[in-house]
Amino acid sequence: MRGATQAAWAVCAATAALAAAGCGSGGGGDAAVLTSSWGDPQNPLEPANTNEVQGGKVLSMLFRQLKQYDPETGKAEDMLAEKIETSDSRTFRITVKDGWTFSNGEKVTARSFVDAWNYGASLKNNQKNAYFFEYIEGYDKTHPDDGSEQSADTLSGLDVVDDRTFTVRLDQKFSTFPDTLGYAAFAPLPRAFFDDHDAWLDKPVGNGPYTVDSYTKGAQLSLRRWEEYPGADKARNKGVDLLVYTDNNTAYTDLMAGNLDLVDDIPATQLKNVDTDLGDRYINTPAGIIQTLAFPHYDKNWGGKGKEKVREGLSRAIDREQITETIFRGTRTPATDWTSPVLGEDGGYQDGLCGDACVYDPKAAKRLIEEGGGLPGGQVRITYNADSGSHKEWVDAVCNSVNNALDDDKACVGNPVGTFADYRNQIGERSLTGPFRAGWQMDYPLIQNFLQPLYYTDASSNDGKWSDPAFDRLVDQANAESDTAAAIDKFRQAEEVVRDDMAAIPLWYQNGSAGHSERLSDVTLNPFSVPVYDRIKVG
Amino acid sequence: MGRYVLRRLLQMIPVFVGATLLIFLMVNVMGDPIAGLCGDRQCAPATAAQLRHEFGLDQPVWRQYLTYMGNVFTGDFGTAFNGQDVTELMGAAFPVTIRLTIVAIVFEIAIGILLGVVTGLRRGKPVDTAVLLVTLVVISVPTFVTGLLLQLLLGVQWSWIRPSVSPQAPFDELIVPGLVLASVSLAYVTRLTRTSIAENARADYVRTAVAKGLPRRRVIVRHLLRNSLIPVVTFIGTDIGALMGGAIVTERIFNIHGVGYQLYQGILRQNTQTVVGFVTVLVLVFLIANLLVDLLYAVLDPRIRYA
Amino acid sequence: MPEPQQPERPEQPQQPQQPERPEQPRPPERPYVPGGDHAAVDGAVAATGIGGAMAFAVDEGKPLGQQPAPDGTGQEEARSLWSDAWRDLRRNPVFLLSALVILFLVVIAIWPSLIASGNPLHCELAKAQDGAESGHPFGYNGQGCDVYTRTVHGARTSVTVGICATLGVALLGSVLGGLAGFFGGAWDAVLSRITDIFFAIPVVLGGLVLLSVITSNTVWPVIGFIVLLGWPQISRIARGSVITAKQHDYVQAARALGASPARILLRHIAPNAVAPVIVVATIALGTYIALEATLSFLGVGLKPPSVSWGIDISAAAPYIRNAPHALLWPSAALAVTVLAFIMLGDAVRDALDPKLR
């Protein structure tokens, strides 16, 4: 307990010394520093170990990668990369721009990237995003999947050519690989990360527009503008204080009371009030997130032949319009394909690909389910985890919709599972016997990211164990295609295979929603539903 | 007396071992926590195995428990999944929760007993009925709603308080959360006091005191209340645990990073180290609270003695 | 551990309290009107001061604001305490009223369609959060279900959970706590330390572990769980009451006269120690109904689709700003139920309290 008091004093002292926001006070303090709601990151703040939004939010301010996704269009654009060249879609020669440093003064070199990637791919470092390096040659040595000892500490596919150049050799063709390099896991790391890892975790050092000023785990992370930041996207405010909230509703109340500047996750229950509470200070922007219902294709009741009719019937029994309007108040839009509108038509999004199968039609639903042999066991149980994300409301609404369509008040029931870990375990053990909620937040804005990890045979997020050789073949062809447009075309054909079998029912595209105080302007959300902090102006 | 306390302190040892073992097993029974760490996707099997090894989850349960207890005795309570030391988490959470609990108990004692005495002496009068109605509201409206409405009203509409509590959580910011937290217990304390007072108001010693011409106030406080407090003290003793470890809703609404919140997060993430660590400390609190309650019996009623 | 002073011990101030001795007003003394079948036991105590004291209570008690006892029993003939209590109860309007309400709740729980013909599971999302309209007097909840129908149909689960869990907790808790308080010594040590361990189990953890393995879709696992985690509290309260009650002179007198422990516990201590248990149990009834919903929200309580007040209250709570009616009605139903049981508990307690006679 003494430690905590001391820590609290330390925070006070640090903030006071910098004449920054007074201890814990929200809207007050330094005029050009904004406060923003935050959740405790679930993993240590290492780039290759952060797989959820809250940690990702910090990394997006602390790091810049070779590529940067445009906050509006989501297009991958060169950031630290001067050029990325390839002749065979398999070996890439990457040149790093000159003049970039970390905020501690160390130069960002080719080695900064290679060391970081090797660290991320090495099994002994427990990095949860290690699989992002799985296409790089030598990954099977640094990260053997069979549980045996790793036989190499570094990826054989990475070679430093000179101070600013390195090459990456993949174990297969992957034409859009450069576009994945904007993901946080591919960030460069300074030597300080390796030399004194604990100190780095207490106060991370990166090469992004902000530097960490102070970090009290579980309470507050203060970021300040890095005045010497070499990039073009220099922060337009003096800093951001991320405050950990136990509940997004509390953050919302604090915003209304004027104690907080920015809430980037409006609680669903308050959406009906945002117009009166916030007016034009409420933003609602499409994000690369799609919610689906996945099926246990390993269960013959759901995966057998002819069962696609039952799946399609269920899809037609869901009144997406009504649910997105009533439950989500327009922060979701009914899905008509399996990707996301943020990809754009050029990026592979196809409005209406699902066709009639995603349109509410009780009669057709009833007929299709009967043709498919009826609901297995006479009832569908939609499994979800009860501990986070308030899934209960939409699952209940989906079930009510199905029940009304099928005229049977027990046709569909929700099946809550207590914890997320238990939920994932049940999926992993294949013990689910009915559809379950599946959400996908894109890692990078490519159609490949919406299809391959989810539907490719035995892919890491193919929870329903759906498998179709035609789909796999098309994805392989698309990845080997060196022309981007041709690759996207192949992916589209693959997506049609998903549609024809109704591998998963697309429900809705999720938007990012946020509210801000009157003293902020230029608040936007990027396609990852994270606020674009560096563009926000205060006052 | 001294020997009695000593004996009670010695009894803490088996309870301590029993409770930690029970909680340890319960968290273990919940299953493998690793699957929840990789987001909406399967952890790479090798990563999962490595993580399991790191947290000692690949060992048999009995060995995990022995290792854990061994570490606890050296002051090492392990680490949470986000890499934070559990001792650090506890060091941040317990002071806040202790303050919140103190506020809540002060409310229970001050308001609860006062209302109990008033209603006990005026049974059936309008004030009794009014307090009963408030009691019903408190029981049937969830804390979530009371907390939320108070927060909106006092924090946003009238700006009397900050809607959320800052990480330092000083006493003045904890007044409203403490009241919300205490609300259901207040109902218990009020009605327990009321019943005891109503029963004892007819006791001979009260009549005697009145007959002696003692001031009414003195009769109530010194004679009547003192003899009516045993059930109330017992209840508050049992309530400390609920206030400290179970304030999940209150702590969430008011953004208090306390024990209830951390414990809840630990349970949902199935982190044995966090859960057992927090519960271990809570068990010690219960044991001491119960000992104090038993000692208070003897103070309140001198006929009760401890050998 | 607390040990009762044995009547045999010489150092104990054992003489009956004289009401006339003002310098010793502190130890509470409860006059106890004996039942006929053990008049001999209590007669000694009663003789010491009950005669004049009764009149004193009525006269002198008033300045403290107490109500005169509802008179009407008189001293007709010797009856047992319990039959006396029952006699009292039947004439108590508060008891009759609360009994009627409880009877109504039980009838509704068994045949909800008597007053609500709709289907509680039928929901039209288009009407979500709408207010009252004809045929739907309480409006609609967040999923567009009829609040009136759901409130009526929710009675079955909620009343069952409330009554059964409370009865279970009260019986188990007061028996174990009473024994611990009465016998003291090693018994008390073991039982009290077991309650300490049970107190340590967080409800969320207990629910996730114990209830997630159960697949039955009835209320019984939920009730069993509540009893399992709820008894320690009542047990502590009962233990404290018994420890106090057994110090009373009439108990010591009964013991001196050779009454068996069982007789002392049941005839003399129980009626005087039961009040705090009744108070805590009647309030706990309301909290158990709410706890059932907490468990459902953890995904381990009743499996959907189940209808209960607790579930509806929890579901409506976040929408309090927009649709307070969805919260109001199930909460009101819960409040009426708790009120009925609190009144019932009060009436029973009064009936058991001999001083009121």
Image: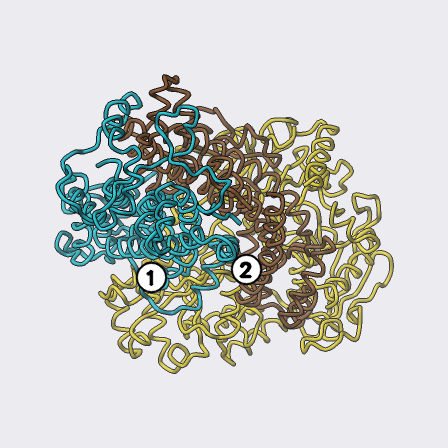
Chain colours: A yellow, B brown, C cyan
Q: Quadrant of residue A446?
A: bottom right
Residue type at numbered disc 1: Pro
Residue for badge 2 = A347
- The residue located at (38%, 43%) in the rendering is C245
Screen quadrant of the C terminus of chain A = top right
Chain letter of the residue beneath label 2 in the structure image: A
Residue B95 left/right relative to B142: right
Q: Residue at x 41, y 71 (%)?
A: A502
Vertical placement of residue A399 versus A299, above or below: above
Whole-percent x and y of residue A384?
44, 62
Tell me if C16 is positioned left or right of B53 in this view.
left
Structural crowding at the residue carrying mark 2, measured as other residues with C-alpha within 10 Å and reported as few (<14), some (14–19) or many (≥20): many
Secondary structure, mark 1, is: loop
Q: Relative to residue C44, is residue A154 drawn left or right?
A: right
What crowding class fits label 1: few (fewer than 14 Cα within 10 Å), some (14-19), or many (20 or more)? some
Secondary structure state at the residue bearing disc 2? helix
User: Real-space Cα distance between discs 1 and 2?
Assistant: 41 Å
The residue nearer to you, when weighing A165 against A488, is A165
Taking A157 as reference, is B69 above or below it? above
User: Do residues under tags 1 and 2 come within 8 Å of each other at their CB atoms?
Assistant: no
Please tell me in which quadrant of the rendered image residue A300 appears.
bottom left
Chain of residue at mark 1? C
Residue C8 circle label? none
Quadrant location of the N terminus of chain A? top right
Query: Could you tell me residue C198's position as x and y percent?
Result: 49, 56
**Residue at the spot of label 1:** C304
Residue at point 43% right, 59% down?
Answer: A351
| Residue C258 coordinates in the image, percent (x, y) | 36, 53
